[in-house]
């Protein structure tokens, strides 16, 4: 029987933890708030988001494991790529509570813009340590591009939607 690679398991599960928390804010607000907004016809169906994000989270976690493994952990050449990875996870996890939880479309747009730049830097730095890891992040960057465009159009088309005040 093969031994369980716990660093791989942990790296793959970790991004999903924030996704699960973000899903709480999302599910709670999709039908009540998000559906009331003007949204573009080209948006993906709501049901597509959970499986796509799950796959992307697992992929980014696996990519981070490859960088950690091939780059000498947190003390070798993987230090900067993993620091960028940690900061992009924080930004990623912050977006749902900002956009869906606080109903702050504009701050969501700013957050996802900074996130996109951070993930692009992750792709470049991951690639230096593990070319495979850099490639694994490309679908994530592509999906973020779509999500950023969607966030922008929702912001543009709903200018009078104030952030929720609790």
Image: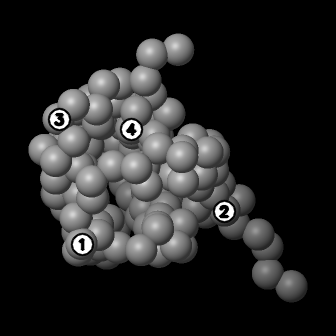
From mark 4 to mark 2, how far is it between C-alphas?
A: 30 Å
The numbered mark, 2 or 1, whose residue comes first in the sequence reads 2
Extreme residue toward the bottom, this view: 1
Give the residue at mark 3: 159
Are the two marked residues, 1 and 4, in contact with CB atoms closer than 8 angstroms?
Answer: no
Q: Indicate the position of residue 96 as horizontal and vertical percent values.
A: 45, 42
Q: Is residue 113 above or below residue 54?
A: above
Give the SS element for disc 2.
helix
Nearest to N terminus: mark 3 or mark 4: 4
Residue 41 is tagged as 1
Say which mark, if any, is on residue 99.
4
Q: Residue at coordinates 40% horizontally, 50% vertically from top-left?
A: 36
Disc 3/disc 2 C-alpha distance (Å): 43 Å
Q: Residues within 10 Å of mark 1 (few under 14, many from 20)?
A: few
Task: Check residue 8 in the rendering and tell me which mark sits there, or answer none.
Answer: none
- Res 137 visible: no
Q: Which residue position holds label 2?
A: 9
Colouring scheme applied when the structure was drawn: one colour
């Amino acid at each position: 029987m093969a031994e369980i690679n716990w660093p791989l398991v942990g790296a793959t599960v970790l991004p999903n933890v924030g996704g699960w928390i973000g899903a709480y804010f999302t599910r709670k607000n999709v039908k009540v708030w998000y559906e009331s907004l003007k949204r573009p016809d080209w948006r993906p169906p709501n049901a597509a988001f959970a499986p796509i994000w799950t796959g992307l989270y697992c992929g980014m976690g696996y990519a981070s494991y490859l960088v950690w493994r091939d780059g000498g952990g947190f003390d070798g050449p993987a230090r900067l790529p993993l620091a960028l990875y940690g900061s992009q996870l924080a930004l990623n996890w912050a977006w749902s509570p900002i956009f869906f939880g606080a109903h702050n479309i504009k701050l969501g747009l700013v957050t996802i813009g900074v996130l996109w730049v951070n993930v692009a830097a992750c792709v470049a730095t991951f690639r230096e340590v593990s070319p495979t890891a850099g490639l694994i992040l490309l679908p994530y960057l592509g999906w973020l591009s779509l999500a950023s465009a969607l966030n922008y159009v929702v912001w543009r088309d709903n200018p009078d939607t104030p952030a929720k005040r609790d």
